[in-house]
């Protein structure tokens, strides 16, 4: 008797685990597990979202025109090279579906977005992981893995969970050494936070070459995670391919309206970035003083490596923080060992993290 089976590759996928949001016995825990913006979206974005409620019976604008025009204006880009997705996740999925098949290899840098692997395995493709020995995408490691079957290279910069970035020089060196028939995905979900001079989100490469895609999201700095909206920049020939497989109404009307206002509200964006920059520095310095190794992050989260002492390791710290009502993100198997990731929160939330970890380290 034959029975129902999924396509090869699907069973290699471990189901996604969302950052925890509840702690037993605590009514309103401090959720620092999913890199959400503690300041929330721009008031202009919320107003646009509320206004969209009156038009819920209508289909959204399938052309995504107003949001694309706003992004093009904000970053001085041609509208013809932009496309929006149901989160940047959907755009990454579409790219992998379009360019990577069962006979192909995709090189995924170790700390790229976890969903890259899921989408590639669903295609039946071979996933080749490029190590990040210094907790940042490593160009030589990636180049060493190229074969005649490689169709795509995916990395995140800043990466996750370390929050480290590839320098402009290194990103360009990677691109220069990639054959033109290989697609380079630069996932720049955290680009909006980065203030480092030698950082390059891949914008120029995506705007001027034929094989680079930069993806961005409204889920992080813009505080619109719930609406699922992101965008990509790439050559028109790639846009043409993506438009063929995009479902006409992949981005919903409230999301399009809110994201448009979010990107136009530069003053609010600046405030959010400034809050992050101040706390990134302050939290990193304070935690270091406590004897915790802090990986230097440029994003809106910090990766902490704990001492090996079982009383002070990441596992103990995780349980201790939870007991104080603080939810960090444990780093899964295969990730940097003995680490926890915490998102930069509100002033009071960051103070609570400092207080809890001071107590923990001094026990
Ligand atoms: C959060 C995140 C994204 C964004 O996902 P969305 O689907 O746009 O919400 C992409 N890449 C990385 C590395 C992330 O952490």
Image: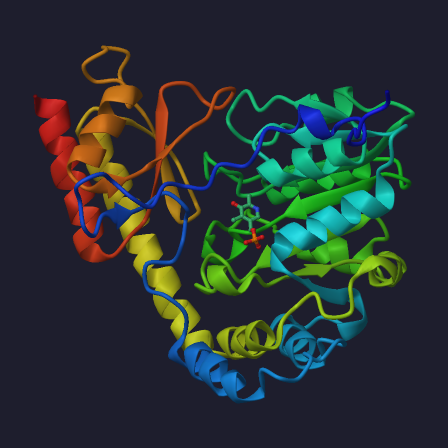
Of residues 22 and 213, the one drawn nearer to the viewer in this rendering? 22
Type of colouring: rainbow
Residue 230 quadrant: bottom right
x, y (%) of residue 330?
38, 30
x, y (%) of residue 26?
17, 45
Looking at the image, can residue 202 be seen? no
| Residue that appears at 59% across and 63% down | 229
Left or right: 304, with 197 as reference point: left
| Residue that appears at 64% across and 60% down | 86
Looking at the image, can residue 64 be seen? yes
x, y (%) of residue 227?
52, 65
Q: Is residue 43 above or below residue 156?
A: below
Residue 46 quadrant: bottom left
Residue most toward the top?
309
Q: If the image is split into quadrants, where does the C terminus sit?
A: top left
Q: If the image is split into quadrants, where does the N terminus sit?
A: top right
x, y (%) of residue 166?
58, 39
Left or right: 95, with 156 as reference point: right
Left or right: 129, with 51 as reference point: right
Q: How many marks?
A: 0
| Residue that appears at 32% across and 58% down | 38
């Amino acid at each position: 008797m034959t029975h129902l089976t999924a396509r090869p590759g699907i069973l290699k996928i471990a189901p996604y685990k969302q950052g925890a949001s509840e702690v037993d016995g605590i009514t309103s825990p401090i959720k620092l597990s999913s890199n959400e913006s503690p300041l929330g979206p721009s008031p202009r974005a919320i107003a646009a979202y509320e206004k969209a409620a009156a038009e819920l019976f209508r289909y959204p604008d399938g052309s995504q025109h107003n949001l694309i025009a706003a992004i093009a204006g904000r970053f001085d880009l041609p509208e013809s090279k932009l496309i929006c997705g149901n989160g940047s996740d959907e755009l990454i999925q579409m790219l992998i579906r379009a360019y990577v098949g069962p006979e192909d290899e995709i090189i995924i840098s170790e700390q790229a977005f976890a969903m890259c692997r899921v989408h590639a395995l669903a295609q039946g493709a071979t996933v080749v992981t490029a190590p990040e020995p210094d907790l940042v995408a490593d160009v030589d490691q990636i180049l060493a893995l190229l074969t005649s079957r490689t169709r795509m290279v995916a990395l995140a910069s800043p990466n996750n969970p370390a929050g480290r970035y590839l320098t402009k020089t290194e990103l360009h060196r990677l691109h220069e050494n990639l054959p033109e028939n290989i697609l380079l995905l630069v996932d720049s979900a955290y680009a909006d936070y980065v203030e480092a001079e030698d950082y390059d989100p891949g914008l120029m490469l995506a705007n001027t070459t034929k094989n680079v895609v930069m993806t961005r999201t409204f889920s992080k700095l813009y505080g619109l995670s719930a609406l699922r909206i992101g965008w990509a920049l790439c050559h028109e020939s790639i846009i043409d391919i993506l438009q063929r497989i995009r479902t006409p109404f992949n981005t919903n009307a409230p999301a399009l309206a809110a994201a448009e206002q979010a990107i136009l509200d530069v003053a609010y964006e600046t405030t959010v970035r400034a809050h992050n920059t101040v706390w990134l520095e302050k939290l990193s310095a304070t935690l270091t003083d406590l004897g915790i190794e802090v990986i230097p992050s440029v994003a809106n989260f910090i990766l902490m490596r704990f001492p090996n002492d079982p009383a002070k390791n990441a596992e103990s710290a995780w349980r201790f923080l939870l007991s104080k009502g603080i939810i960090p993100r444990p780093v899964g198997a295969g990730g940097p060992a003995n680490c926890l990731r915490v998102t930069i929160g509100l002033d009071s939330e960051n103070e609570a993290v400092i207080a809890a970890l001071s107590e923990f380290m001094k026990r």
